[in-house]
Amino acid sequence: MSIYVGNLDYGVTQADLTDVFAEYGSVKRVHLPTDRDTGRVRGFAFVEMGTEAEEDKAIDALNGAEWMDRELKVNKAKPREDRNSFGGGGRKNYRF
């Protein structure tokens, strides 16, 4: 399982997040998505910790906490939904 961390400052680094979450247990991985066009951090991250208990402890402590002048949103990450690459409702076949 992993933790979703939202409302991050755009200057945050993986090292910054590792330091903060290491206070609550072992950090296995930090994924900090960037915009594919600009390369800029997108304002959220995913953190994986050693155990679920460590994740729960970090979530309890950090959700709503102020860090880098922002109020963090920290919770269990939800599974990624499959998205249709075409968007919208698909193609309709009409007969005239």
Image (spheres, rainbow, N blue to C red):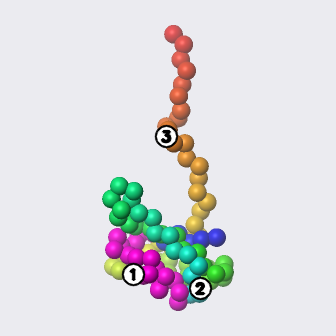
Q: Secondary structure at mark 1?
A: strand
Mark 3 vs mark 1: in front: 3
Disc 1 and disc 2: Cα gap in Å?
20 Å
Magenta-drawn segment: 6-23
Q: Which mark is residue 2?
A: none
The amino acid on which the numbered mark 2 sits, given as a three-letter code, is Ser
**Quadrant (top left/top right/bottom left/bottom right) for the N terminus:** bottom right
The percent position of residue 59, horizontal first and vertical second, equals: 55, 78
Of callouts 1 and 2, the N-terminal one: 2
| Residue 61 appears in the rendering | no
- Residue 26 has which mark? 2
Residue 20 sits above or below residue 43 on the image: below
State the CA–CA distance, disc 3 to disc 1: 35 Å
Q: Work out whether residue 38 or residue 65 is closer to the camera in this orientation and state it.
A: 38
> Is 18 a magenta residue?
yes
Q: Which residue is mark 3?
A: 87
Asked which secondary structure carries label 2, the reply is loop
Nearest to the eye among marks 3 and 2: give it.
Answer: 2
20 and 13: which is toward the camera: 13
**Residue most toward the bottom?**
23
Q: Pointer 1: what residue?
A: 67
Q: Amino acid at mark 1?
A: Trp
Residue 25 falls inside the magenta stretch? no
